[in-house]
Image: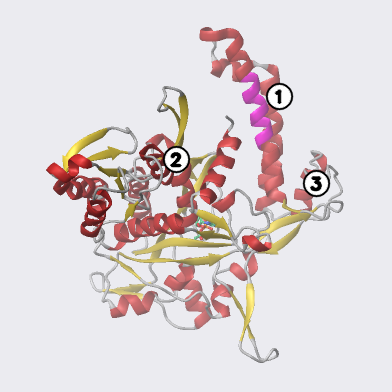
Amino acid sequence: MTNEDIFKKLIAHCKEYGFVFQSSEIYDGLSAVYDYGQYGVELKNNIKKYWWDSMVLLHENVVGIDTAIFMHPTVWKASGHVDAFNDPLIDNKESKKRYRADVLIEELLSKFDAKADKEVEKAKKKFGENFDETLFRQTNPRVVENLKKKEEINVRFVKALNDNNLSELKQIIIDNEIVCPVSGTKNWTDVRQFNLMFSTDMGAAADGALKIHLRPETAQGIFVNFLNVQKSGRMKIPFGIAQIGKAFRNEIVARQFIFRMREFEQMEMQFFVKPGEELFWFNKWKELRMKWHQALGMGNHKYRFHDHEKLAHYANAATDIEFEMPFGFKEVEGIHSRTDFDLAQHQQYSGKKITYFDPEQSESYIPYVIETSIGVDRMFLSIMAGAYCEEDVEGKDGSKETRVVLKLPPVLAPIKLAVLPLLKKDGLPELARKVIEKLKFDFNCQYDEKDSIGKRYRRQDAIGTPFCVTIDHQSLQDNSVTIRHRDSMEQERINIEMIEKIISEKISMKELFRSII
Ligand code: GAP
């Protein structure tokens, strides 16, 4: 199965099992906008809790806030979003389809890598164990030629982006004969800048209405409240402010399911530090954030850092945490050292002093900022992609069956426990209900009595439930049940009183947190 097939299956699974639905589906949907279903919302809430508590419970110098989506229009002028939050877009005149010029070129560049990889794969098969891949890549004329061509285009591309040279971007597309995937033609418009912010009018009268933007990031709500929080909370530097909330971007190319959405959710934390100490804190947060991801047990090899070579003019360090999605390693989180850019801009545009008086140094300064910024939806996608498994298992009659199982970290699973009476009679449902009544205050439980026990196990596997408890006739006699573990499918007989302890240990965030501090 190709990665593309796996991704298609994952998307279908998300819909079939109530994780993610296309928004307004009965009206044929709204592009790049999604709704979360009954299990999706539980998983999403658990992700948010894992993040929130890891910020505000584990760090006594990090506090949370919740700011409005609408903000004064000057906020976006000061932050640079009005003038510079743009993507270069290009239209194909035949198909009338719109593309990001930079994405078309990036896709071309990745084709050169793919061609080189194909040559390597062919040679690997031909030469077997004696194959020296490094030497082959350095000497095979076809591979060398491909990589050289790629590098030439890349140099032009990076320069065009740095110079903001839109006509050069178009020229790269023309020179390399990039065609529209829909019309197959090279009939392109010029490249133009396109601002990604949505706008709307606030106020009743059309002529007196104020044009405002839907926030494209939650961070600015934190910056404009820096002094409110610092003063009201008597916060001392270094300290952080965390926020979870919706953000909106009018993405030109919205693809890859919930990876790039027009309405999405961010979890951002701005950590305010003394100027000169920012790189120490940047490295500290880099390490802490990677630990947070890896503690979930999806496999450390699935994460990597991607340090930015090209930095925004106000940043002095930046890195992404990438996860191996079915379509390659992709950014899930950004960690940026943003200097004093944002606070200084707001000070200038608002005319209000935004400084911190450092009692130890007896001096005032504008703090520097380390930002950690992660998309809830991307995190959700990474967890679903890492958890989705198809396994060959033996069916009832000895035949082979495929088991689809979501190996979600138990701490994030939407349902923690399914309680299943073996039969719908003889007092078994009543005992099952009693178990749920007792445990429902501690974790999300589900009762299911329909179909064979095997089918019920499969349904729970498909939504990632880590434990199933089965009530049978023996349970009535000796108060014992079988508990089935999702990943190993192993079953053990335990006393009913033990259920809570076994599950609590496995789904405890406390244990995860202990491993990351
Ligand atoms: N305040 C900094 C900031 O917003 P960003 O790299 O543009 O930085 C941060 O976004 C994170 O937000 C990304 O790493 C990603 O997880 C998420 N994100 C950004 N655009 C998104 C989109 N269109 N759809 C889903 N998630 C998105």
Depicted 5 relative to depicted 119: above or below: below
* Discs 2/1, front: 2
The amino acid on which the numbered mark 1 sits, given as a three-letter code, is Glu
Residue 314 vs residue 289: left or right?
Answer: right
**How far is mark 1 from mark 3, CA to CA?**
22 Å
Q: Nearer the viewer, residue 320 or 164?
A: 320
Q: Is residue 378 visible?
A: yes
Residue 227 at x, y percent in the picture: 37, 78
Q: How is the image coloured?
A: secondary structure
Of the numbered discs 1 and 3, the one sitting upstream in the chain is: 1
On residue 145, the disc is 1
On residue 386, the disc is 2
Q: Residues within 10 Å of mark 1 (few under 14, many from 20)?
A: some
Dominant secondary-structure state across the stretch colored magenta: helix
Of the numbered discs 2 and 1, the one sitting upstream in the chain is: 1
The amino acid on which the numbered mark 2 sits, given as a three-letter code, is Gly
Residue 292 at x, y percent in the picture: 34, 48
Depicted 176 relative to depicted 78: above or below: above
Q: Nearer the viewer, residue 429 or 493?
A: 429
Q: Residue at x 58, y 68 (%)?
A: 80
**How far is mark 3 from mark 2, CA to CA?**
39 Å
**Element at label 3:** helix
* Discs 3/2, front: 2
**Element at label 2:** helix
Residue 184 belongs to magenta span: no
On residue 171, the disc is 3
